[in-house]
Image (spheres, rainbow, N blue to C red):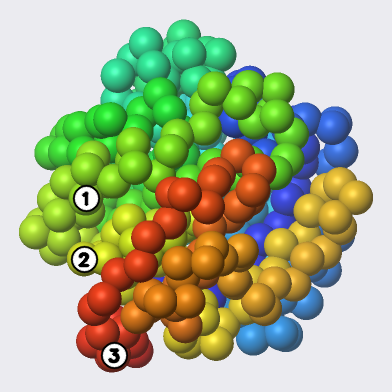
Amino acid sequence: MANLGYIQVTRICNQKCLFCSNPENQRTISVEDALRQAKELASAGYSGVILTGGEPTLHPEIEKIIQKISSAKIAVRMITNGQKTAESGFLKSLKNSGLVHLHVSVHSVREDVQAYLTQNKDSLANILKTLDYSRKLGINCDINIVICAQNADHLDENVILLTQRFPNIRHFVFNMLDTMFNRVDENPYTVARCADVELSLHRALHHLESTGRSFRVERLPLCYMVDFAFASTETRKIVKNEERTVNFLDEKNKVRQTDFFHDKGRVCAHCFLDDICAGLYDLGGKYKEEELYPVFVSKEPIIRKILKK
């Protein structure tokens, strides 16, 4: 997979996701700043950039940002909640500006759950329009799913429905909640225990693997995904010695991440995968040490599989 840098172009949004880690602060960057940041990332060795937010489609000059970055021979992608892109004319204008790849955030294919999580009753209907229009326009689409208490029991339902309806979708990303910032503190009931996620996620990943699709999982310790450890975002970064840079529109500013280890429990010292496992994000906060357990499988086949891909 490509090593991509991230640029927040706006922190305005048209949804109110209960678990948002980058909520609105009304900040927006200029076209010139976006291009400068993209060139800096390209010079640092990144193979492309992902525009994010907030909701990047709400930037008043998003087409111009895409056009400028694309004209600089930098591959440009965008993460979107799929609301404004449900307008076929707008999505076509993004493609004509140089957008080649979308990452669409959809957390549940159950209309009521998606509406509740995003506080938008039309969210799923608009996402399905976006995915349909993207297919017709020839825009590559990945799916981003934030794992929370409200969808932890039907992650497999999500991927089965989406892959059956949109066979062109070939890659899925699953993210456990970023529990240390913003709206999760206001809505702690959105946090799913690792054990609540395990079965449904395993079924989802098995379906994706059996249909020849790729996938990644972030912030979940390897003891909950042993069969798919090669797909852990952090484990892949650790094994391949990669980094990640995000240009934020808040007090974090530019963050270059080279260390992908989180906290470890005492049992982790006995785990055969300890060297390549990130551990448990927010250990001692929203997540407890008791959730961790050691596994006794060799790390070598996992490393070989990561380096082979």
* Residue 276 drawn at (x, y percent): 45, 79
Count of picture labels: 3
Q: Are marks 3 and 1 in contact (CB under 8 Å)?
A: no
Q: Are marks 1 and 2 in contact (CB under 8 Å)?
A: yes
- The span from disc 3 to disc 1 (Cα, nearest Å) is 21 Å
Mark 3 lies on a secondary structure that is helix
Mark 1 lies on a secondary structure that is helix
Residue drawn 27% across and 66% down? 226
Residue drawn 23% across and 40% down? 200
Q: Is 99 situated above or below 36? A: above
Residue under pointer 1: 202
Q: Is 237 situated above or below 145? A: below
* Other residues around mark 3 within 10 Å, as few (<14) / some (14–19) / many (≥20): few
Q: Are marks 3 and 2 in contact (CB under 8 Å)?
A: no
- The span from disc 3 to disc 2 (Cα, nearest Å) is 13 Å
Residue under pointer 2: 227
* Other residues around mark 2 within 10 Å, as few (<14) / some (14–19) / many (≥20): some
Residue drawn 73% across and 50% down? 8
Instruction: Residue at the far left: name it.
Output: 210
Residue 23 is at least partly visible in this image: yes
Amino acid, disc 2: Asp
Mark 1 or 2 closer to N-term?
1
Amino acid, disc 1: His
Residue under pointer 3: 300
